[in-house]
Amino acid sequence: MADEVEIRQETDRGGAKLGFAPWADPAARPLVRFDAVTKRFGETRAVDALSLDIFPGEFFALLGPSGCGKSTLLRLLAGFEAPSEGRVLLDGTAIDAVPPHRRPVNMMFQNYALFPHLTVEGNVAFGLKQEGRPRAEIAARVAEMLALVKLAPLARRKPHELSGGQRQRVALARSLVKRPRVLLLDEPLAALDKQLRGETQFELMELQARLGTTFVIVTHDQEEAMTVAHRMGVMDRGRIVQVGTPAEVYEQPNSRYVASFVGDVNLIEGRLAAVGPSGLLIDSTVGAKLATNQRVEADVGATVWVTLRPEKLRVATAPPAANENCVSGHVAEIAYLGNVSLYKVRLDNGFMMKAQLPNLTRVVERPIGTNERVWLSWTPDAGVVLTG
Amino acid sequence: MRRGASSFNLAAVALGLAFLYLPMAILVIFSFNASRLVTVWGGWSTRWYAELFADGAMLESAGVSIRLAALSASIATMLGTLAAIALTRAGRFRGRTLFTGMVYAPLVMPEVITGLSLLLLFVALDLDRGFWTVTIAHTTLTMCFVAVVVQSRLVTFDRSLEEAAMDLGCPPGRTFLLITLPLIWPAVAAGWMLAFTLSLDDLVIASFTTGPGATTLPMRIYSQVRLGVKPEINAVCTLMIAVVTAMLVVFSLLSKQTRANSE
Ligand SMILES: Nc1ncnc2c1ncn2[C@@H]1O[C@H](COP(=O)(O)OP(=O)(O)OP(=O)(O)O)[C@@H](O)[C@H]1O
Ligand SMILES: [Mg+2]
């Protein structure tokens, strides 16, 4: 049995993109800038004093629960909503006065919004016809785009004769064919089944890398955001609470909200007991002393929270040597998920902890059974200490 | 609810249908009567139709009515569609409820009042009454019906289609022509049919607002009937029933298609 667990999806994307980090470069000019933008609908603030920079060539994901203002943010950029306060800038110029049909930004709608009376071809050609391009050029670009999304054989069909996945491709082709500066995708994969969604995520990433277009994708699926995006912004009630690469957001959440929204987490409350040279000591409510090698902006005695990802916990059937960063309890539930198993452990004071172990062997009999006493332990760098 | 209809229900339906359609059935049958006497059956014949098509005044009135119905229906369709768009799209502007009420009021306004008020208006403006004044009057009457039909389609119209078109570089006006209109046209056409039928049928408002030289078919029939019912009248009424029925069938087919489209 492996007693040390480290499952982390590789979030650095393919070799070509390694080292792509314009957000870290102070000289880089953002392509899109939200400058203290507020959008009010009556009493609701759908977007609340939000500032955000998105860089050329970036794949940016907006992540947040339903109703937090993701679609509104995209619609502000597409021009369907005007900010109540603040400005939206594209390439350094304010575009608030530019109507949607003159913005070099295209959107893929949450419900695809395909024109039902036009064929696949007609849908894709629509944007180019509005530009008044010559017939031959339109035909060539439409054919190229349909080939890119593998829809060439269906060019003459009407949208109602397509499957959900095919419609999604038409919508994608239609919004890409004009070669926009920014492509906005509003939950583009929400209507697809899990398998197709996975495949399409990789196709989107490939397409984005190939075209170099800036993509802004909205999703409420954190796995999707982490899979496709260079950086993600986590939203809560109209505000962006954290922006960072998927790895930063996952490993260094800046609040309990982000920690619990992105991924599975154990949140342990405690009181800061001591600040030493090598880290913090925390008296936790689960009855153990927690040691971390982090620093926080808090005084001794302040309430803090330690977040521990389930896969960072060691599960053992005998007490480990150190008595810091170790709790003990009984296995209450085991969820077998195929590649991993999730153990729910009820600590002696009733607190529930989640630990995740990989299923390394094909044995049916689990090494640890329900109701067995186990010890959960972790290293000082496993937990993230939060003050809010 | 798949129980067989009780005999009471059947009787009620039969009685109701008879009440509605027996008079019309009698009219249609007697239009094929060979006898000159309206109430005596003299065998089948189409001679009244032949006489009808030789009756210059009657044909002229039919021509007036059809031109009037086509023209007023077309204007009413344009205005009614615009009103429907304003009502569904303009959001919450001040006085919206009042505006909605004002668009729909002619639906329930007694025709005598509509006719009389239009007559007063035309007199006040010193307009020569005739074909054009009836056209205006019928447009006023029918445009609210068009607005109702088109609005019922627009409320289920997916706005994101228009947004998608604009997003792809299509200005708002062109978006209406390229996206909205092709998708709502069955409702617009249905509205036109309804307006056409209403105009063709109208007697009251036309009587108030017309002038010399523009006698509509219902007016001609009415004035002739006052001198006694001729079998020829039965024939022309039968033709009108045929036209109106055809229009209503097309209208209901279009409405069905509208519903299918919006799903
Ligand atoms: N046109 C509008 N009028 C009034 N309120 C609106 C309008 N559009 C959005 N809102 C409100 O603004 C808030 C944010 O809406 P938004 O559509 O941006 O959410 P979202 O994050 O996209 O949610 P979802 O994941 O469900 O799509 C919601 O509370 C919503 O009710
Ligand atoms: Mg949304």
Image (cartoon, helix red, strand yellow):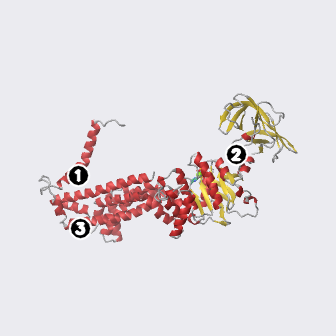
Residues at discs 2 and 1 in contact (Cβ within 8 Å): no
Same chain letter for marks 2 and 1? no
Dot 1 crowding, Cα within 10 Å, few <14, some 14–19, many 20+: some
Give the SS element for disc 3.
helix
| Residue carrying label 3 | B60
Q: Is residue B195 visible?
A: yes
| Residue carrying label 2 | A257
Give whichever of B146, A119 is nearer the camera: A119
| Residue furthest right in the image | A277
**Percent x, y of residue B228:** 16, 58
Mark 3 vs mark 2, CA separation in Å: 80 Å
Mark 2 vs mark 1, CA separation in Å: 74 Å
Kind of residue at disc 2:
Tyr
Give whichever of B144, B121 is nearer the camera: B144
Q: Left or right: B163 with respect to B67?
A: right
| Residue carrying label 1 | B24
Give whichever of A165, B35 is nearer the camera: A165
Count the labels in the image. Answer: 3
Kind of residue at disc 3:
Glu
**Percent x, y of residue A174:** 55, 60
Relative to B210, does residue B194 appear above or below in the rendering?
above
Q: Is residue A39 visible?
A: no
Which image quadrant for residue B188?
Answer: bottom left
Q: Left or right: A300 with respect to A57?
A: right
**In the rendered image, which quarter contains the N terminus of chain B?**
top left
Dot 2 crowding, Cα within 10 Å, few <14, some 14–19, many 20+: some
Residues at discs 3 and 1 in contact (Cβ within 8 Å): no
**Percent x, y of residue A76:** 61, 59
Q: Left or right: A191 with respect to B104?
A: right
